[in-house]
Amino acid sequence: MTKKADVLLHPVRMRIVQQLLLGKPLTIAQLTEALGDVPQATLYRHVNLLLKAELIEIADTQKVKGTEERLFSVREGNLKVPEGEIESTSIEDHIRYFSVFHSNLLQLAITYLANTSPEKYKEEGFGYWSTPIHVSDEEFIELVQSVNQCLEKVLDNKPSSERKTRLFAGMFIPQKSEQS
């Protein structure tokens, strides 16, 4: 059995899922155009893997020039990697997953920076940071719950002319300190 993380944390499949999470179902042709650098044959292969893993689904079909075109959407409830799978993943696989995750974020940042003037960064909410925080285990749990509650308030928002899509990425890396 393939781990869900193996399916999701692949450079092309991660980009497909992220594109589909932007709001509306897309065809292979639309995904090819949106991703730009992924050949259509490669895209078909990865879409089929995502379908087989039940991470995306066929949301609709439409007739175009006599052929049936499929529209794909994400099965959002299926995207979460189970805790048991995370705990049983090897260090090497975690490093590989993190590398794909980080590379994807880097590519998104490069694309944004290449197409946006620095004067727009603050207005559009572009930023990145790393801040050590000192919290007890209880305070950490409370912090995570607070962040999750804030995110839950906006996760179901649909795209509109008033809303800009922003990617929120986060992580916590425990650090050793002199008091630990």
Image (cartoon, helix red, strand yellow):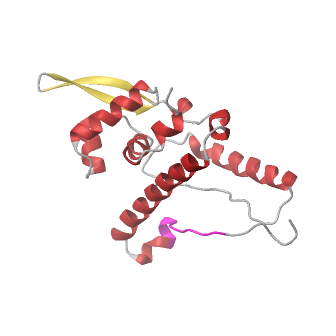
Quadrant housing residue 59: top left
> Residue 153 colored magenta?
no
Report x, y in % for residue 101. 50, 53
Report x, y in % for residue 156. 56, 39
Q: Is residue 119 left or right of residue 31?
A: right
Total numbered labels placed on residues in the image: 0
Residue sitting at 46 percent across and 31 percent down? 55
Quadrant housing residue 27: top left
Mainly helix, strand or loop, the magenta region? loop
Q: Is residue 86 above or below residue 116?
A: above
* Magenta stretch, residue numbers: 122-130
Q: Is residue 26 among the parts visible in the rendering? A: no
Q: Is residue 88 above or below residue 64?
A: below
Residue sitting at 28 percent across and 26 percent down? 70
Quadrant housing residue 129: bottom right
Report x, y in % for residue 172. 68, 57
> Residue 127 colored magenta?
yes
Q: Is residue 83 above or below residue 129?
A: above
Q: Is residue 86 above or below residue 162?
A: above
Residue sitting at 64 percent across and 69 percent down? 130
Q: Residue furthest left?
A: 65
Residue sitting at 46 percent across and 26 percent down? 54
Between 117 and 72, the one lying in front of the other is: 72
